[in-house]
Amino acid sequence: MSLRTRLAFLYTAIVGGILLLFGTAIYIIVSVALVNQIDATLIRATREIIQTTRIESSNSGDMQVVILPPLDFSTDVFAQVWGRENNLQAQSPNLSGFGSPLDPAGLLSGEAVFHNVTIGTAQLRVITVPLMLSGRWIASLQVASSLAFVFATQRVLLAVLIVGAVVSMAFANFAGWLSTRQALASLETVTQTALQITRADDLSRRIPYDGPAEDEIGQLIRAFNQTLSRLENLFNTQRRFVADVGHELRTPLTVIKGNVDLMRRMNCADDESMDSIESEVDRLSRLVGDLLLLAQAESGKLPLAWNPVELDSLLLEAMQQMSVLARDKINLKLGEFDQVTVCGDPDRLKQVLVNLIGNAIKYTPAGGEVILSLGKEGTKARMTVSDSGPGIPAEDVPFIFERFYRGEKSRTRSRDGKGFGLGLSIAYWIVRNHKGSIDVAPRQPNGTTFCVWLPLSPGECKEKEAETST
Ligand code: ADP
């Protein structure tokens, strides 16, 4: 059964239940009110009769005979007086010819009682009242009224309630059906779009929605569209990644194959070819190593030592190591320098510094400068690598931490045999695994400043908590 049918039935059942409760209450209240009204009429008539009744002694002298007053009995009110010996003493004219007690059971009770009785096809409400004389029960007065009006009213009321309930339930069902159709139409669009996406393998599609964005359907569609964007992004990244890896592998493999062919043809292994093969194999190993490291860091599974790390010593070590690369081409120097301790893996943090300083040296023209600095800001350590190079074009900035991303200039540069476009990604993920962040800003008048933020060590370094990998 569809959701729409179920909702329509639910509405119908709710309306039906409410109507059943109200209908039952109305039916009972009206019935009780009608019977009360008849009882009040009977009590009034009984009082009137008793007040005007005559009691005469019989001929024998010891028996009293009750004579009903010549009241104007409406056709609906009947009266009888029965003596203690069950002898009919008097009855209203509208009962002439009827010689039985209106309520035989009532005659035995000795107190005022109401009973419903059926005589032939007529249903009557009967009150029986004992008539007393000087404290003696001498006869019983029975006054009755027809219940036909009550039953007729009950029948009409029941019919009205049943017809009303059926019409209301049909209306509720129809209204439920209509209103859910409008609400669920958007869900059908979601289903259709999802099917189209699957069939056409096209993640660029989005679900259109004209309704209010903050309602449940709007939120669902927004969440679905966000998921699609994320999936599209992931698929594109994956595709690009495979293409990039393929591209990076092909060049060294072509060089190696060319050299092997050459050596086979020449039938000798010359030093130049061997050097070239070795250098390309080194490049391949570096690429595979970087990729493995990145995969581990991205999934948060990078094995990290978690010890206090003195960033000042680490920075000096990295500077020492990279000064070989800078030689006298670049002025590598220290700026602000503080003593700072963080928790983490010294080798990995040094790798971040080496990648940043390496890039700064690589992209800064000869004669430029690279300034390293270290300080604290609040609860964070701040390490900066600032160069006087050409800077990073604004359009490249959002992408530089992506795998294999290389700025236009770097791509068109002659291959320096080193860059794969992985250095900044690796730095980014290592810093993320240390609960820190990394950002980049242009340096005035020219150049680039990379800034790494890490939480300061609270004293001892407790076991590292699970790291988010997104
Ligand atoms: P690679 O240096 O191997 O190309 P990276 O991931 O280290 O890869 O850097 C990505 C890109 O960011 C580089 O291709 C370059 O365009 C840009 N870049 C990084 N550091 C600098 C810098 N200090 N100055 C200018 N551009 C930079």
Image: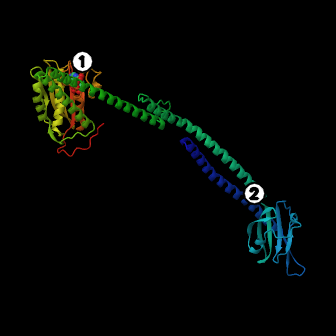
Q: Decide: few, some or many residues near mark 2? Use Cα within 10 Å; few <14, some 14-19, many ≥20.
A: some
Q: What residue is at 19 percent from the left and 39 percent from the top?
A: 456
| Residue 129 vertical placement versus 444 (above, below) | below
- The kind of secondary structure element at disc 2 is helix
Distance of label 1 from label 2 (alpha carbons) = 101 Å
| Residue 33 vertical placement versus 406 (above, below) | below
Split into quadrants, the picture shows ligand 1 in the one at: top left
Residue 67 visible from this viewpoint: no
Amino acid type of the residue tagged 1 in the rendering? Thr
> If you read the primary sequence from the N terminus, does the residue marked by circle 1 or circle 2 appear first?
2
Q: Position of residue 214 (x, y in %)?
A: 46, 35
Amino acid type of the residue tagged 2 in the rendering? Phe
Q: Which residue is mark 2?
A: 151
Q: Residue furthest right?
A: 59
Q: What residue is at 79 percent from the left and 71 percent from the top?
A: 104
Q: Position of residue 287 (x, y in %)?
A: 21, 30
User: Which quarter of the figure has residue 50?
Assistant: bottom right
As rendered, which of 422 and 182 lies closer to the eye? 422
Q: Decide: few, some or many residues near mark 1? Use Cα within 10 Å; few <14, some 14-19, many ≥20.
A: few
Q: Position of residue 157 (x, y in %)?
A: 71, 52
Q: Which residue is mark 1?
A: 412
Q: Are marks 1 and 2 in contact (CB under 8 Å)?
A: no
As rendered, which of 276 and 184 lies closer to the eye? 276
User: Which quarter of the figure has residue 130?
Assistant: bottom right
What numbered label is drawn on residue 228?
A: none
- Look at the numbered disc 2 and say if its residue's Cβ is closer than 8 Å to ligand 1: no
